[in-house]
Every structure is written in C-alpha cells, then in structure tokens.
C-alpha cells in the first residue's frame, strides 16, 4: 500500500470516529440524563425516540449568525474553539483500539497524549481573555486554576501505570497489563478518572462554566458553529478520557476472545466509562471552587504520590 | 466532602446519590406525551362549562354569583298563549348567554348555584385561542359542549333514596307501604351504580341539591 493511501485511510478513520463517537455519547447523555431525572428526553427529531436530535442541533448551529463582540480580540476569539477541539483529535490518533488498530503508534504515546491534552488550558484562556467579558474572564481564570491543578494528579497517576508497565507506549502498556493490576493500580485509576473529569470540565467539576453564576463561563460570547465546536470538544473529551482510562487501567482490548474482538472490548469499555461520566454528572452537584481545589491538592495529589511509591515498591520487590 | 463530620461512613452519601439516579433510570418516566397521547383525566374534571339552553329560565343567579362577573345574559319576555288557560303566560327567552373564559377562574359557583341544572362541567380543555377575544363563548358554543358532559354519577348505594324516587316507589307500592319502598330502591340501585363510588361521594347527585 502506498504511503499516502495508508495515511489517508488512517486519518479518515480517525476523523470518522471523531465525528460519530461524540454524537453517540451526546445522544446517550440526552437519553440517560432524561431517564435518570424521570423524563423522556428528545422524542421528535428523526422520528424514533429522537435519535436525530444532535443532527438537528448541528443544523441549527450552522444556521446561526457568527458574532464576535465589538471589543473582542477577533483573531484569538475565532481561533479558540479550534484550539479546544484540535488536541483531542490528535490524542485520538494515538489511542489503540486493538493490538494493531491504532492510527499512529508512538513509542512515547503516553507522553504525547498528556502533553497534547495540556493544550486545552490554552483554549480556555484564549476564549476567556479574547471575549472581553467579565464572566468569561472569571470562568477562564477558574478554568486555568482547575486545569493546572488537576494536571498534576493526572500525570502522576499516568506515571504510576507507565512505571508498572515499564513503557510509555500506549499499546505497550495494554500489552503489559494483567488483571491483578485492577487492584494494584485502582487508586491511580480512580485518581486519573476524577482528574480527567476535571480536565474536560464536566460536572461536578464545571466551575469554569457554572451556568448558574457565570452565564456560561468562557463560552458566554460564542454562538453558532464556534459554540458547537466547544460542545463537540466537550463530548470528544468524554471519549478521550474514557478511552485513556480504558487503555491505561482497564486493559484495553483484553477480554474473552480478545484476538478477534479486541476492538469491541475497547469500545465497550469506553462506552461503559462514558456512561459513568454521564451518571456522575446527573448525580452530583457542582463542586465549589474551594472544594474543587481542596480535593485536588489535599486528596488527589497525596494519593497519587502514595500510589507512585506503592508502584515503585511492588516493582522493585518483584 | 470535607464539610461536616456528622455523617456516618464517608462516601455513603455519594454512593446513595448514585443509587438514586440509577434506580430512577430503570423506572418508567413520568412524562406525559400530551399532544400525542390524550391525558387520562379524572372523572368530573373541570374543563369547560356547558349550557343546556332549554333548562335555563334566565333567573340570573349564575351571573350574579359569579365572582368574576364573566357571565353575560340578555333576555326578553314573551307571551305564551296556553289554550284553555285563563290568561296568557309570560316566559323569559334567552337572547344572549356568554361566558368569558379569559376571566373565568373555574370556581364552579355558577354551576352549583343554578337551580335548574342548566350549567354543567365538561372535561374538554382544548379550546385555547390565539386571540383572547375568542375565549368569549356564546350560547351556541356553550351549548355544543353539552355533548361532552359525562353522565351524572350513580346514586350512592348506601345513601338515602332521592325524594323523587322515594315518592315514585311509594305511589307504585300503594298506600301504607313506605318501608317496602325503601328496600325496593336499595335493591334496585346496584344495577344502576356501575360507575365507581368515588365519583358519587365526591359530588352529591344533582337531585339532592338544595333548591
Ligand atoms: S366558574 Fe366561577 S368564574 Fe367561571 S363563570 Fe362560573 S362562577 Fe364565574
Ligand atoms: S342560574 Fe341557571 S337558570 Fe339561572 S340564568 Fe344561570 S344558567 Fe340560567
């Protein structure tokens, strides 16, 4: 296969996954959230139980006027949604679905993924500052504090599993994974998942958005397609966090019949985790800013450090 | 999370919260899909007021008792010559009977107060209009609602028989048989009482109303 064809197929596959998976998660969120609240959710769009609701939403977003506030820093303002969206696309490139099913196998996959995820904070700050709106600015600063804070437990937890596996490559980590790691790395898995939730600013960690006090945080001034990009970024974020947790801690494609159905196992685990993310959103109220920072610095960071020590100890002992 | 020490096991509340949402998800949702599925209204729902024009004697009681003054009645008198009678009788003829449903507060006083059972509740409720003036229903429109009036609730089996029934039964049984008549009526009523008793107890039957 010529190189360019190979490349095109990989990129197209990732883009398709990038566009469909968030839609599935978004629709699932509509429905799951509705039923958890004793409602039905969308019922009309598309005919059967509102399956086309998000498509309709997309069409609506495209039709809307694209407004930039007068005092906004236009170039930065316009660029921010893309900066929010793009890192996730890059992350998806490096996530393996099956043993050979990865768009771009990287030796330093974990490092790459964490580094690219860190770009998210830039988008928040860009949109917040460029909007020339005090609510946006407040939301952006909260977002920056939160993202920088939670980056630490996220990286420490990931480092623990990388240390256990002795490799930074994502397929390598899944290869090295054993079922008993579920126990050994459980604290790291929980820390990673919680910190990941905070990284994608999902409720209960949506203090930067906090629509009841900050209008819509750093997204206040966005409309139309650019706003849709931010929303899309949120849902791709769910996929990315669920996928990373799956790959790092839940053994990716390991499972019965993993030779043929490995990719299915990965997808299944990703969707299960996405469900948990939605479930958490419906259940818990938003954490206050101080509670949020306390949870990060006084609970997650020490726990992550302890897990690192434990991992190192077990590694040396065996 | 870090706030109070009164709670028992840490994290118990968090788990309970998750359980609540999960349990709710597995239950049927309470959403009524109204325009697609007709709502199941309780019997005797107060939707709109129907007018049985033939019963109305233009006594004006309803219009006077209405707290909102939203019943408008006009009438004129008519001479009716009854053959054989000494002189012509006078009769009220209804010209106009309007209820303004943009003012009505559905208190039901007009229906309670009408001595001749000319006004009735019906459970129809889909008469919203885009213009508030169209909510003034004239007597034809009020008369059309009569079709939707549910039959009156059955007589309470354990209650006393109504005056009319009792007299009729007494007449039928002949002189001096008052007690027999009562038992007769008791036996007869369950066949007519097919509707649930709940409705019968909620609202007294029209014939029992004080005149
Ligand atoms: S229901 Fe009450 S407010 Fe409405 S017309 Fe009758 S008396 Fe007036
Ligand atoms: S109270 Fe009854 S009879 Fe009297 S005017 Fe009103 S509707 Fe007619």
Image (cartoon, coloured by chain):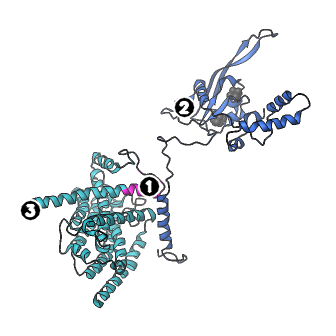
Chain colours: A cyan, B blue
Circle 1 marks a residue in which chain? A
Which residue does the numbered mark 3 point to in the structure image?
A3
> What is the secondary structure assignment of the residue under circle 1?
helix
Q: Is residue B147 magenta?
A: no
Q: In the rendering, which numbered label is found on residue A34?
A: 1
- Residue B41 seen in this snapshot: yes
- CA distance for labels 3 and 2: 74 Å
Of all chains, the one bearing label 2 is: B
Please give the residue where the numbered disc 2 appears in the rendered image.
Answer: B135
Residue A292 image offset from top left, x and y in percent: 40, 72
Is residue A97 at all visible to an observer of this figure?
A: no
Marks 3/1: CA–CA distance:
47 Å
Q: Are marks 3 and 2 on the same chain?
A: no
Residue at (36% x, 45% y) in the render: A45
Q: Residue furthest left?
A: A2
Q: Residue furthest bottom?
A: A317
| Residue B189 figure quarter | top right
- Quadrant containing ligand 2 reads top right
Badge 3: chain ID = A
Disc 2 is placed on an element classified as helix
Q: Inspect the magenta stretch and tell me whether residue A33 lies in it.
A: yes
Q: Please provide percent x and percent y for residue A200.
A: 32, 65
| Residues in magenta, as a range | A28-41
- Whole-percent x, y for residue B71 in the image: 64, 30
x, y (%) of residue A172? 22, 75
């Amino acid at each position: 296969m010529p190189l360019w064809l190979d490349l095109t197929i990989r990129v197209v596959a990732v883009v398709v996954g990038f566009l469909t998976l968030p839609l599935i998660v978004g629709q699932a969120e509509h429905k799951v959230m509705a039923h958890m609240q004793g409602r039905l959710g969308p019922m009309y769009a598309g005919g059967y139980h509102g399956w086309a609701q998000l498509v309709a939403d997309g069409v609506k977003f495209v039709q809307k006027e694209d407004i930039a506030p007068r005092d906004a820093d236009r170039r930065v303002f316009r660029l921010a949604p893309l900066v929010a969206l793009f890192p996730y696309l890059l992350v998806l490139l490096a996530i393996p679905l099956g043993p050979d099913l990865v768009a771009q196998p990287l030796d330093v996959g974990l490092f790459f993924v964490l580094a690219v995820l860190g770009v998210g904070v830039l988008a928040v700050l860009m949109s917040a500052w460029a909007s020339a709106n005090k609510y946006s600015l407040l939301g952006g600063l909260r977002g920056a504090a939160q993202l920088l804070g939670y980056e630490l437990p996220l990286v420490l937890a990931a480092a623990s599993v990388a240390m256990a596996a002795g490799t930074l490559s994502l397929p390598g980590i899944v290869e090295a994974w054993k079922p008993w790691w579920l126990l050994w790395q459980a604290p790291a898995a929980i820390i990673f998942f919680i910190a990941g939730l905070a990284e994608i600013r999902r409720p209960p960690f949506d203090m930067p958005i906090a629509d009841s006090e900050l209008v819509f945080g750093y997204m206040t001034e966005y409309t139309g397609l650019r706003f849709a990009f931010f929303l899309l970024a949120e849902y791709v974020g769910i996929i990315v966090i669920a996928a990373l947790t799956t790959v790092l801690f839940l053994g990716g494609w390991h499972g019965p019949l993993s030779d043929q159905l490995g990719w299915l196992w990965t997808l299944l685990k990703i969707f299960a985790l996405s469900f948990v993310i939605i479930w958490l959103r419906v259940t818990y109220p938003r954490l206050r800013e101080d509670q949020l920072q306390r949870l990060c610095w006084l609970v997650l960071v020490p726990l992550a450090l302890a897990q690192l020590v434990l991992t190192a100890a077990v590694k040396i002992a065996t | 999370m870090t706030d109070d020490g009164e709670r028992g096991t840490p994290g118990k509340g968090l788990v309970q919260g998750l359980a609540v949402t999960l349990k709710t998800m597995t239950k049927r949702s309470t959403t009524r899909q109204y325009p697609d599925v007709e709502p199941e209204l309780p019997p005797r729902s107060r939707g709109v007021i129907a007018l049985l024009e033939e019963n109305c004697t233009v006594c004006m009681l309803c219009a006077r008792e209405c707290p909102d003054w939203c019943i408008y009645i006009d009438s004129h008198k008519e001479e009716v010559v009854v053959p054989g009678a000494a002189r012509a009788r006078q009769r009220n003829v209804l010209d106009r009977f309007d209820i303004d449903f943009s003012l009505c507060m559905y208190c039901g006083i007009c229906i309670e107060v009408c001595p001749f059972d000319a006004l009735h509740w019906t459970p129809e409720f889909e008469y919203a209009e885009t213009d508030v003036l169209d909510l003034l229903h004239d007597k034809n429109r009020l008369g059309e609602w009569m079709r939707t009036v549910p039959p009156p609730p059955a007589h309470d089996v354990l209650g006393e028989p109504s005056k009319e029934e009792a007299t009729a039964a007494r007449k039928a049984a002949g002189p001096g048989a008052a007690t027999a008549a009562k038992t007769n009526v008791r036996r007869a009523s369950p066949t007519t009482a097919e509707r649930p008793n709940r409705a019968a107890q909620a609202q007294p039957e029209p014939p029992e109303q004080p005149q």
